[in-house]
Image (cartoon, grey):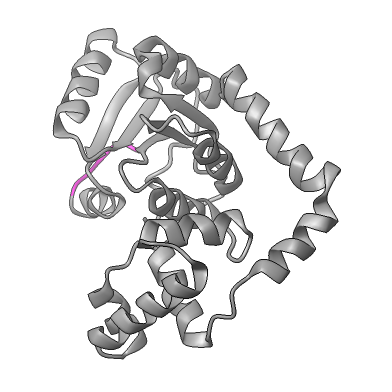
Amino acid sequence: MQQKNNYINNKNGNNLISVALVDKSLLYRDSLKVLFDTIGSPKLVAYAPTFEQLNDLYKKEEREPFDILLVEIGDKPIYSIHSIKRMVEKNPNLNIIVLTEETEDIYAVYSIRAGVKGYVLKTMGFSALLEAIQHVYDGNFYFNDDILKNVIYDYQDKYLNNGEKEEVESHMASPILSRREREVLELIIDGKTNSEIAQALAIKEVTVKNHVYNLMQKMNVEHRTGAVLKAIKQGWVAI
């Protein structure tokens, strides 16, 4: 989402916390709206199923700027986290809290690397979400103890225990992909479909399918998501 200054609230003494939400579930969006309206603050000022639609909403309507952006990373968490990373790179002041039902620790690690300020499992309940919003609004981070523990393990494993060894092994284990196959892989990580990849690279869709098949064979994975996860875990591409 191409963020502009009028999207992000500059704290001006107003104690009312403004929140925007990206979540594909209409039921969840409406439910949070009711809950926020009931308590008064935080205030849900905008919500949409995708980053693009939230962006369009602000382009088309007068909307109150937000302090916190809540993002559900959904059924394609790696794609969502990659989008978050690009958003934070463009807007370093953007405060993002991830919402998710994904319990795999690796997604929390990737989210933190992407620059989020908080990470909340939906099973933790509304009170945990409110606590996370307040912490981030106050300039802090919010990650529960289990998440922090695994982030520390990830850091130690990568940088303290065998950092140099793993870097060499990852490089050696990297499959020999052609330049075009690497371009296709990068676009897959961006969540692009075969049709969108063909358009981006100005090639035929059948050619894209061939490249996808070849890179999956070289990477020894059975599906696109497996290729994305393996590429990121092995350090062949950065999240």
Is 235 positioned to the left or the right of 19 in the image? right
Is 100 positioned to the left or the right of 228 in the image? left
Is 34 positioned to the left or the right of 122 in the image? left
Q: In percent of the image, x 45 and y 48: which residue is there?
A: 81
Front residue of this view, candidates 224 and 45: 224
Q: In percent of the image, x 43 and y 50: which residue is there?
A: 78
Up-down relation of residue 204 to residue 23 (above or below): below
Magenta-span inclusion, residue 64? yes
Q: Position of residue 60 (x, y in %)?
A: 18, 53
Q: In percent of the image, x 38 and y 62: which residue is there?
A: 222
View extreme (bottom): residue: 203
Front residue of this view, candidates 144 and 219: 219
Q: In percent of the image, x 64 and y 26: which residue is there?
A: 148
Front residue of this view, candidates 134 and 205: 205
- Where does the magenta region start and end? 61-67
Specify the principal SS of the magenta part: loop
Q: Position of residue 208 (x, y in %)?
A: 32, 82
* Residue 140, visible in the rendered structure: no
- Quadrant where the N terminus is found in the figure: bottom left
Magenta-span inclusion, residue 139? no
* Residue 92, visible in the rendered structure: yes
Among the 4 quarters of the image, the one containing residue 39: top left
Up-down relation of residue 220 to residue 3 (above or below): below
Among the 4 quarters of the image, the one containing residue 152: top right
Q: Across the whole image, how many numbered discs are drawn on residues?
A: 0
Among the 4 quarters of the image, the one containing residue 170: bottom right
Up-down relation of residue 86 to residue 181 (above or below): above
